[in-house]
Image (cartoon, grey):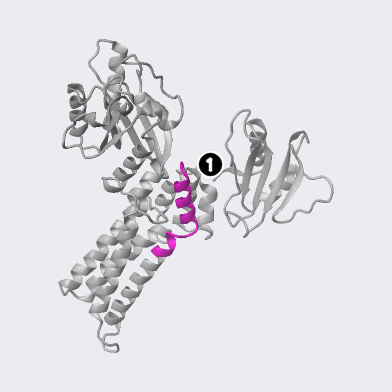
Amino acid sequence: MRETIAAISTAIVPEQGSVGIVRLSGAEAVAIAQCLFHSPGNQAWESHRILYGFVRHPQTQIMVDEALLMLMLAPRSYTREDVVEFHCHGGIMAVQQVLQLCIEQGAKLAQPGEFTLRAFLNGRLDLSQAESISDLVGARSQQAAQSAIAGLQGKLAAPIRQIRAACLDILAEVEARIDFEDDLPPLDELAIRSQLAQVLENVTQILATADRGELLRTGLKVAIVGRPNVGKSSLLNAWSRSDRAIVTDLPGTTRDVVESQLVVGGIPVQVLDTAGIRETDDQVEKIGVARSRSAAQGADLVLLTIDAQAGWTDADQEIYDQVNEGHRPFILVINKIDLIDPVDIPHYPASINQTVQTAAAQNQGIDDLEKAILSTVQTGKIQAANLDVAINQRQAAALTRAKTALQQVQHTIADQLPLDFWTIDLRIAIQSLGEILGEDVTESVLNRIFSQFCIGK
């Protein structure tokens, strides 16, 4: 029998948060609650009931908090064990004191993700659903949250199970011919080839969501670079609808990288407004320029910004050459377009194939900029598929192993090798697909996955 575990399952912030929750799960959860919680009147201690009362020290009877108690008895609980939650006052002291009392009564402090691990081990969730819970907690956009909910509802697990079942059916057909060759009709090789082709197509479609999943989870890092005073800070302010960056007519105002968090087309975007890149004797500005170059090198996408009035200058060309060296996706932003005649659009290198015209000080061109960014995401190195769910790196690695094994089965069939050889790679594919669902997964893999969860989840 597993130990009863306890943890604070809400964020602890001084003077903030109206409610703090201490959660217990395990066979002794109710007994610990009965020892600590005193409910006045004749309130029934029944499953899925909320009790009102007081948390008291079991020896001194000193009241620790006025609280609510929620009972969720097995198997109708998150972990499929007895679960008890103390809903205390928020802040720091109340929840920490209640947690300490639970530990003194025999509960063990939960490890990161241990509640969800128990839900997985007790069969309430498969591994892909458990990972979706972590994605939901960490979601930074509505689209990321919806993708996580889809995974929690089994929209990834269902097609994986279908693919694995198809592989098992093929394996059963092949092994039946090996064991009972004289009693069965010859194997329909054309049918097997067709089934394998369909399975491979399904695997490839799911694998195509890996890059989208990475985007939804980690977001897109975009750096705004250019000469001083071309309107980079104005562009950030207009885009973020705030005054994050200081804007003046003096070159070199921005001395450090200024960050802003946005969401574009459901994708979290971290925007970096950098110091103007130029040669300078100012030591502080030199540091800012160095950080600008570093930000451009580490960005997923660069917005090279120029001044429409000044046109394409030698300094712009130098910055363009530096950005282009890394073959990093970039968009040319021609800013201050409101200050020139439309026929006087500055010339720029013919190799630049994506431009946007903005008047950041007038909040113009931001929609076009976002459309250009999404277009770059969809057609560039970073792919964004349109499926409901998006796999993570671990799932992508398992699917890649399955795809390689299935392709090897096709080669084996084409080379007319004996049926025994077919089964080797079919088993590898089946095992790899099972790893996604948690049906064939090692303890070390589980520890690595759930260690990334927050404590209390």
Q: Quarter-wise, where is residue 169 in the image? A: bottom left
Identify the residue at horizontal 65%, vertical 31% (top origin): 93
**Residue 371: % across, % down:** 35, 42
Q: Residue furthest bottom?
A: 183
Residue 204 as seen in the image, left or right of residue 101: left
Residue 159 part of the magenta segment: yes
Relative vertical location of residue 393 with respect to residue 325 in this rendering, above or below: below
Relative vertical location of residue 436 with respect to residue 199 in this rendering, above or below: above
Residue 97 part of the magenta segment: no
Q: Give the magenta part as a residue range.
A: 140-160
- The overriding secondary structure of the stretch rendered in magenta is helix
**Residue 175: % across, % down:** 30, 77
**Residue 52: % across, % down:** 76, 45
Of residues 179 and 88, which is closer to you in this image? 88
Q: How many marks?
A: 1
Relative vertical location of residue 111 with respect to residue 183 in this rendering, above or below: above
Q: Circle 1 sits in a helix, a strand or a loop, which is it?
A: loop
Whether residue 33 is visible to the viewer of this picture, yes or no, is yes
**Residue 416: % across, % down:** 16, 75
Of residues 362 and 303, which is closer to you in this image? 362
Residue under circle 1?
455
Whether residue 258 is visible to the viewer of this picture, yes or no, is no
